Image (tube, rainbow, N blue to C red):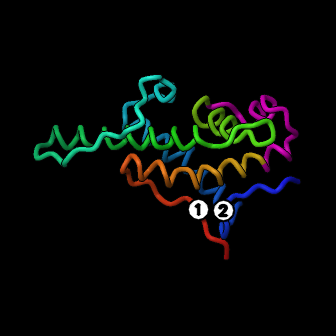
Amino acid sequence: MENVNLGVGIDQRATARKVRIFLKYTFSDYLIKAGYHRTDLTSPQLDVVGISAHSGSNSAESKMMRIFDMQNRCKAVYHAISCCKDSSKQPFRTILKSLYIDELEDWQVADKIGYSDSRYDDLKRYALCQFADAIDTWKTLYEVNIPDLKVPEK
């Protein structure tokens, strides 16, 4: 098995589990609150710079700021997926995008990348751990509050 650098000191299985839950449930919640559909994230109109503004004084302004915040969280997630490695030996971006943007099933993604189930499980775990590293950069760039997804080794 090839050695993939996934960050020192993280529990890969626990981190992958935490990221999987985040992408399946929390990210879906962000999309709903942002008024986005997953396909909106692949639009060429997706900007790289987040919307940042001061908190509004009235209710309508506060609601709009909440929507902008959720949209920026979605963009941070999408960009974190987009910057993951994507080669024939490390198809991390393909795995994450296929599962959490295109909503394919695991068996479909394994077939798409041409790996056995056991190798696919390893690659998926590596992809989820790489996402946990990548999201730290994008949540900072978009100035959004996304939880730390890395679980330290015990």
Q: Relative to residue 47, is residue 87 drawn left or right?
A: right
Mark 1 residue type: Lys
Q: Earlier in the sequence, mark 1 or mark 2?
A: 2
Q: Residue furthest left?
A: 57
Residue 27 place in picture, x, y as percent: 49, 43
**Which residue is under mark 1?**
150
Q: Does the magenta run of residues contain 101?
A: no
Q: Is residue 88 left or right of residue 8?
A: right
Quadrant, the C terminus: bottom right
Query: Going by the image, does 97 lie left or right of 13?
Result: left
Which numbered mark, 1 or 2, is in the foreground of this view? Answer: 2
Q: How many marks?
A: 2
The residue closer to the viewer here, 27 or 115, is 115
Local crowd at mark 1 within 10 Å, few (<14), some, or many (≥20)? Answer: many
Q: Report the magenta stretch's main SS.
A: helix
Q: Is residue 125 above or below residue 91?
A: below
In the depicted structure, whether residue 42 falls above or below residue 58: above
CB within 8 Å, label 1 to label 2: yes
Q: Secondary structure at mark 1?
A: loop
The answer to which of 75 and 5 lies nearer the viewer is 5
Which range of residues does the magenta coloring cover? Answer: 103-122
Tell me the residue at 24%/37% (across/down): 64
Residue 142, horizontal then vertical, whole percent? 39, 46
Q: Nearer the viewer, residue 47 or 19?
A: 47
Element assignment for label 2: loop
Q: Image point 47% across, 22% down: which residue?
A: 44
| Residue 8 place in picture, x, y as percent | 67, 67
Quadrant location, the N terminus: bottom right
* Disc assigned to residue 7: 2
In the displayed structure, 98 sits above or below 85; it is above
Callout 2 amino acid: Gly
Q: CA distance from mark 1 to mark 2?
A: 9 Å
